[in-house]
Amino acid sequence: PADRLDYGFRLATARKPSPQELQVLQTIFAKHLAKFTQDTAAAEKLLAAGTAPRDTALPMSEHAAYTMAANLLLNLDETITKE
């Protein structure tokens, strides 16, 4: 997960995350992974949104946790504010 989260951060911000930023991403990912592992119906509902089909190469709970991490990245002030 650390490599994927690092890559996602770099795609969204055009820079490497600091160790603290990466730790926050890993914590958020782990929290959501635990939630979606326990509540697969919530993971299924999240992944049903949108027009693209679910990537079946990833387990549903893992896919949903990465979706929430991507949501966090795309909602950072750094990614939505143009200076």
Image (cartoon, rainbow, N blue to C red):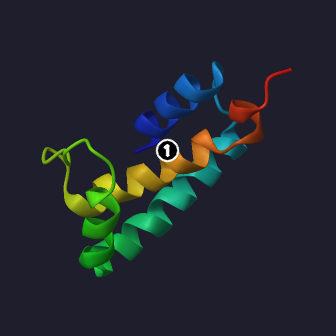
Residue 31 vertical placement versus 38 (above, below)? above
Residue 12 vertical placement versus 57 (above, below)? above
Spot occupied by residue 56 in the image (x, y as percentages of width and height) = 13, 48
Nearest the eye: 62 or 71: 71
Spot occupied by residue 24 in the image (x, y as percentages of width and height) = 64, 53
Residue extending furthest toward the bottom: 38
Residue 81 occupies quadrant: top right
Nearest the eye: 19 or 29: 29
Q: Is residue 8 left or right of residue 42?
A: right
Residue extending furthest toward the left: 56
Tell me the kind of residue under disc 1. Answer: Ala
Spot occupied by residue 48 in the image (x, y as percentages of width and height) = 26, 59
Spot occupied by residue 63 in the image (x, y as percentages of width and height) = 30, 53
Residue 61 vertical placement versus 83 (above, below)? below
Which residue position is annotated with label 1?
Answer: 70
Residue that appears at 19% across and 56% down:
59
Residue that appears at 65% across and 26% down:
13
Residue that appears at 29% across and 73% down:
37
Count of numbered tags:
1
Instruction: Give neighbour class at mark 1: few <14, some 14-19, many 20+ (Cα, 10 Å).
Output: some
Q: Is residue 79 left or right of residue 33?
A: right
Residue that appears at 56% across and 60% down:
27
Identify the image quadrant of the N terminus. Answer: top left
Disc 1 is placed on an element classified as: helix
Q: Is residue 54 left or right of residue 50?
A: left
Identify the image quadrant of the C terminus. Answer: top right
Residue extending furthest toward the front: 51
Residue 65 vertical placement versus 16 (above, below)? below
